[in-house]
Amino acid sequence: MDNERLVHDLIIDHLKNRFRKEYSEIKVNPGGDPDMTLSNHGLVLAAVEVETAGSITTEKADKWKDLAQPGTKLILMVPKNSRVKVMEILWQKGIADRVGVGTYDIAITMP
């Protein structure tokens, strides 16, 4: 398993635990789009996509556009240093107003 896949899966696992208090139904779709759906009482309220530095492309943004449907919020989780690039792509695709962008950063500090 490559490092980007490990990071992707780690972020998915972290988000699953974090969203557990807010949503009654959390479905993880390994290898599918979206990576995770968040629901309450059978109603899908949000779709979550976790991206790594290598997976952020304009072609991928077309999938984001398909996922950012009215009534369902799309949450993108991207590396902290890729946020500006992602926002530019979202504006180009005309979906910046329908997508929430969160960031993650893995920091290792040495003594």
Image (cartoon, rainbow, N blue to C red):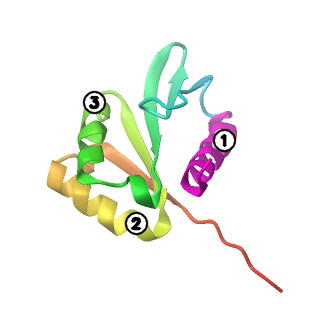
**Magenta part mainly helix, strand or loop?**
helix
Residue 7: in magenta span = yes
Which residue does the numbered mark 2 point to in the structure image? 82
Eye-nearest disc, 1 or 3: 1
Whether residue 105 is situated above or below residue 46 in the rendered picture:
below
Q: Where residue 53 sits: x, y (%)?
A: 44, 61
Q: Please tell me in which quadrant of the rendered image residue 92 appears.
A: bottom left
Q: Where residue 96 sits: x, y (%)?
A: 25, 51
Q: Where residue 26 sits: x, y (%)?
A: 59, 26
User: What is the three-letter code of the residue carrying label 1?
Assistant: Asp
Identify the mark nearer the N-term, 1 or 2.
1
Judge by depth and name the residue closer to the eye, 98 or 66: 66
Q: How many marks?
A: 3
Q: Which residues are magenta?
A: 1-21
Judge by depth and name the residue closer to the eye, 102 or 1: 1
Taking the spot 19% from the left edge, 56% from the top edge, the residue there is 91
Identify the mark nearer the N-term, 3 or 2.
3
Q: Where residue 21 sits: x, y (%)?
A: 68, 34
Which residue does the numbered mark 3 point to in the structure image? 69
Q: Which residue lies most toward the right here?
A: 111
Label 1: how many Cα within 10 Å (few below 14, some 14–19, many 20+): few
Whether residue 11 is situated above or below residue 31 in the rendered picture:
below
Q: Which mark is residue 13?
A: 1
Q: Which residue lies most toward the bottom here?
A: 111
Measured Cα–Cα span from mark 3 to mark 2: 23 Å
User: What is the three-letter code of the residue carrying label 2?
Assistant: Ser
In the rendered structure, the answer to whether residue 71 lies left or right of residue 102 reads: left
Judge by depth and name the residue closer to the eye, 63 or 4: 4
